[in-house]
Amino acid sequence: MEQVFHVECFTCITCHARLRGQPFYALDKKSYCESCYISTLERCSKCSKPILDRILRAMGKAYHPRCFTCVVCNCCLDGVPFTVDATSQIHCIDDFHRKYAPRCSVCGEPIMPEQGQEETVRIVALDRSFHVNCYVCEECGLLLSSEGEGRGCYPLDGHILCKSCSACRIQDLSAKISTDC
């Protein structure tokens, strides 16, 4: 510290323990014994232990790199893309999608990007969500699409139908109504 001390004056600034022959730390030209120095260090937001080496900062908090992990799978997120939920819980991207992605009303699986992709297509019809490959006519199984003639969705009474199946159902309903009168 480029200063000269009497032996009895070379003490820890905090606890006043003598530092001669002991490990000490100089911080802002003040000397600290090891335990007092450690108490000045930032503490990890997860484990609450002092951070002695590299500090990882995320969301305004300090972490040991090994403590910055996904709340679901516990994988280390140091240098890896991550996201947080509404309660500020840290998730890896895959677990976040698995937990919060909308579910397909046909297969029940989450609608999330394929491995290596960042986006996916979700079809919403009658307030229900569908994977592209699960968006089929409930009657005949024809894959529905917004492209191509007759491949669109023609909903009827809460059912997802293709054009021809919808027309058949309307015709059947019309015939039943006319016979009831």
Image (tube, grey):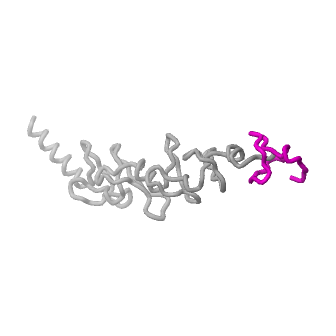
Q: x, y (%) of residue 118?
A: 50, 59
Q: Residue at x 84, y 47 (%)?
A: 29
The picture quadrant where one finds residue 60 is top right
In the image, taking residue 103 as reference, residue 89 lies left or right, namely: right
Q: Is residue 125 left or right of residue 16?
A: left
Q: Residue at x 90, y 50 (%)?
A: 3
Q: Tell which residue pokes out farthest to the top in this image.
A: 181
User: Which sits in the foreground, 86 or 71?
Assistant: 71
> Residue at coordinates 33% horizontally, 51% vertically from top-left?
104
Image quarter of the C terminus: top left
What residue span does the magenta drawing correspond to?
1-29
| Residue 41, position as x, y percentages in the image | 68, 46
Closer to us: 156 or 178: 156
Looking at the image, the residue that sits furthest to the bottom is 116
Q: Position of residue 111 (x, y in %)?
A: 39, 54
140 lies above or below 176: below
Classified by dominant secondary structure, the portion drawn in magenta counts as: loop
Magenta run includes residue 105: no
